[in-house]
């Protein structure tokens, strides 16, 4: 037998074995669960992003998928792989304040869908660093709490798309980088700059938003860059150029900044089609910022519309200038251009100030893009171009009770003359302005209703278009009539089918009722025969009943008669104290006397002789004699 100590030792050994097994099993499951990084091309999984990249099995052009989770890493990407986070911004890569989070030193790298944070605030710490890389796509990421959100250094032909940069010193910094595209991204709450070019060239910034930064967009000693359709607001400097030349600033919205657009020592830049509103200084040119072209801009409710310090620039293109909300000149020749210049200072004058806001649109004809410009004192929207019928269309809207105008410019190759303008289906007079030339057409027309659809086009095409529209309208009416007739036909067809179905049901009911009727007729004839027999029986029964009743009545009468006679005779007998024999004798004699006359008539009629007993005693004797003869026999 095992003693107490042996049992205790055995129990302890078993317990340790179970604990060891559980720990080993749990460790295996934990290790398996922590493998959240997957190479989709090899099917292998890893515990970290860096491990997945460094694996010998991971080759160029492989895709690495990262599961949702928290990854504290500083990753070097030295293979042209695609790093893709699980959807939903659930993949957080945290640098722990220890340095650059994604350092890209290879070409054609994609980084998509990550939350990238906490590289640290040292000047050489980056959320993403593209170091001499090209062909990379950085898209749909959120980068925050880093000194640089993204920095490109000697990087070319990369795309940054739909990213968000916040709480950094610099959201995006391009240094010595060319032909990159920064598209549809957001930079806000950054200490210094949202989007920074220093120095870089031939880059495109389009569709971005920058707010609550010291500088929204800062272009420093850079050239030939394009800033298109961005929004810069709620910053000290919306857009700032310093020492930069030959850049294009087009169709941007710049508002609620201390300086909307500021140029310092920057020349030969093009600033056109922009909206300036609610800035302290809408446009500031200083420190020998010369020979910049500024036209087709809308300067609305700003504290100061334009400021120039030691600079001389062009505020028109020789035909059209800008819209200045405080311009008080007249347009006596009705061409949409003010008759007197708008003067900023002696070196900066808009010779052709616009009498209404400028709206620029793009139209594509035979795969080539063309510009269409509209100057109007009402709002313009909904531009469309129909090359196949040589017409362009847009909507205008404003207040009632005001005379509105439009000045429209378009390339001649878009529309063939003569020209025609139709407002809400009615032709209006349109003047061909003298500034029209061999390449471009300028039309001017007025109207006086609050909201319109404007069609501008070639008269032959519009005439044909009107006929076409009439035919289309007639066709649509015919289609509508056909549809109504088709609906009526379907209704009648349904009604016919319902009626036919009801008729079929009624026919079935009729056949059933007819069959039932025929059966009832047969039953009636049978019952009728039986009823005849019953009637005969009933008649016999009635006859028998009548006879029986008659007999009963007669019997009752005779019985009642004899009963009365009997009772009378009984009363007489009881009165004279006669014995029953005496009574019988007397009754017999009375009956002989009554029948005597009948017997005589019978004897005379038939010639026979009847000898009735003379007395009751004779009958008694005769009966006794018969009885004796019967006993002897």
Image (cartoon, rainbow, N blue to C red):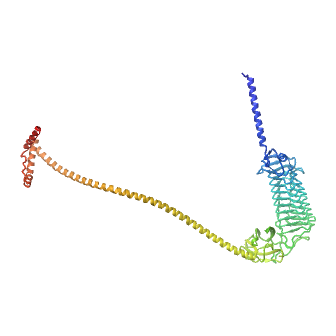
Q: Position of residue 200 (x, y in %)?
A: 90, 59
Q: Is residue 212 visible?
A: no
Q: Position of residue 395 (x, y in %)?
A: 74, 69
Question: Against 166, is 30 above or below?
Answer: above
Would residue 148 appear left or right of 606 to someone viewing this image?
Answer: right
Question: Against 14, is 314 above or below?
Answer: below
Question: Against 73, is 447 above or below?
Answer: below
Residue 207 figure quarter:
bottom right
Q: Position of residue 124 (x, y in %)?
A: 90, 51
Quarter of the picture holding the N terminus: top right
Q: Is residue 161 visible?
A: yes
Of residues 602 and 267, the one drawn nearer to the viewer in this rendering: 602
Would residue 611 appear left or right of 257 to someone viewing this image?
Answer: left
Residue 340 figure quarter:
bottom right
Q: Position of residue 380 (x, y in %)?
A: 77, 69
Of residues 161 and 390, the one drawn nearer to the viewer in this rendering: 390
Quarter of the picture holding the C terminus: top left
Q: How many marks?
A: 0
């Amino acid at each position: 037998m095992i003693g107490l100590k042996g049992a205790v030792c055995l129990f302890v050994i078993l317990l340790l074995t179970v604990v060891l097994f559980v720990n080993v099993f749990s460790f295996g499951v934990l290790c398996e669960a922590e493998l959240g990084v997957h190479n989709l091309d090899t099917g292998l999984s890893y515990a970290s992003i860096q491990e997945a990249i460094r694996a010998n099995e991971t080759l160029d052009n492989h895709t690495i998928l990262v599961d949702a989770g928290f990854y504290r890493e500083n990753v070097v990407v030295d293979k042209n792989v695609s790093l893709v986070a699980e959807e939903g911004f659930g993949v957080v890569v945290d640098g722990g304040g220890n340095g650059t989070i994604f350092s890209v030193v290879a070409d054609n790298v994609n980084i998509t869908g990550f939350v990238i944070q906490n590289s640290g605030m040292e000047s050489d710490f980056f959320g993403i660093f593209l170091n001499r890389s090209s062909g990379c796509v950085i898209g749909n990421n959120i980068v925050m709490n880093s000194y640089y959100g993204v920095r490109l250094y000697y990087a070319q032909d990369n795309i940054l798309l739909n990213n968000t940069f916040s709480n950094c010193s610099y959201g995006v910094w391009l240094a010595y980088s060319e032909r990159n595209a920064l598209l549809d991204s957001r930079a806000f709450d950054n200490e210094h700059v949202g989007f920074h070019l220093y120095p870089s060239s031939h880059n495109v910034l389009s569709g971005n938003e920058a707010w609550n930064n010291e500088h929204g967009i800062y272009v420093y000693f850079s050239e030939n860059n394009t800033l298109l359709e961005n929004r810069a607001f709620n910053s000290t400097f919306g857009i700032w150029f310093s020492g930069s030349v030959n850049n294009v600033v087009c169709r941007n919205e710049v508002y609620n900044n201390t300086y909307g657009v500021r140029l310092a020592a920057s020349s030969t830049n093009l600033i056109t089609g922009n909206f300036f509103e609610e800035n302290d200084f809408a446009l500031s040119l200083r420190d020998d910022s010369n020979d910049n072209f500024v036209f087709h801009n809308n300067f609305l409710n700003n504290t100061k519309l334009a400021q120039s310090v030691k600079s001389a620039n062009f505020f028109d293109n020789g035909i059209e200038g800008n819209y200045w909300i405080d311009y008080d000149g007249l347009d006596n020749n009705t061409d949409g251009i003010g008759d007197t210049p708008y003067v900023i200072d002696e070196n900066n004058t808009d010779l052709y100030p616009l009498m209404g806001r400028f709206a620029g649109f793009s139209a594509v004809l035979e795969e080539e893009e063309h510009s269409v410009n509209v100057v109007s004192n009402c709002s313009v929207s909904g531009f469309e171009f129909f090359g196949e019928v040589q017409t362009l269309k847009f909507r205008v809207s404003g207040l009632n009770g005001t005379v509105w105008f439009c000045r429209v410019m378009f390339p001649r190759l878009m529309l063939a003359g003569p020209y025609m303008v139709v407002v809400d289906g009615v032709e209006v007079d349109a003047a061909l302005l003298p500034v029209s030339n061999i390449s471009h057409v300028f039309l001017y027309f007025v109207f006086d209703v609050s909201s319109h659809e404007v069609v501008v086009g070639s008269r032959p095409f519009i005439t044909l278009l009107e006929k076409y529209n009439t035919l289309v309208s007639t066709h649509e009416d015919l289609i509508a009539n056909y549809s109504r007739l088709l609906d009526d036909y379907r209704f009648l067809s349904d009604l016919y089918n319902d009626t036919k179905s009801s008729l079929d049901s009624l026919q079935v009911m009729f056949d059933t009722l007819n069959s039932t009727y025929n059966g009832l007729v047969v039953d009636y004839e049978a019952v009728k025969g039986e009823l005849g027999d019953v009637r005969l029986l009933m008649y016999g029964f009635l006859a028998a009943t009548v006879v029986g009743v008659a007999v009963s009545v007669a019997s009752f009468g005779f019985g009642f008669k004899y009963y009365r006679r009997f009772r009378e005779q009984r009363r007489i007998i009881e009165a004279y104290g006669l014995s029953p024999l005496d009574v019988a004798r007397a009754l017999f004699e009375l009956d002989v006397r009554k029948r005597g006359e009948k017997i005589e008539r019978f004897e005379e009629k038939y010639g026979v002789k009847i000898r009735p007993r003379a007395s009751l005693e004779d009958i008694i004797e005769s009966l006794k004699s018969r009885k004796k003869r019967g006993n002897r026999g």
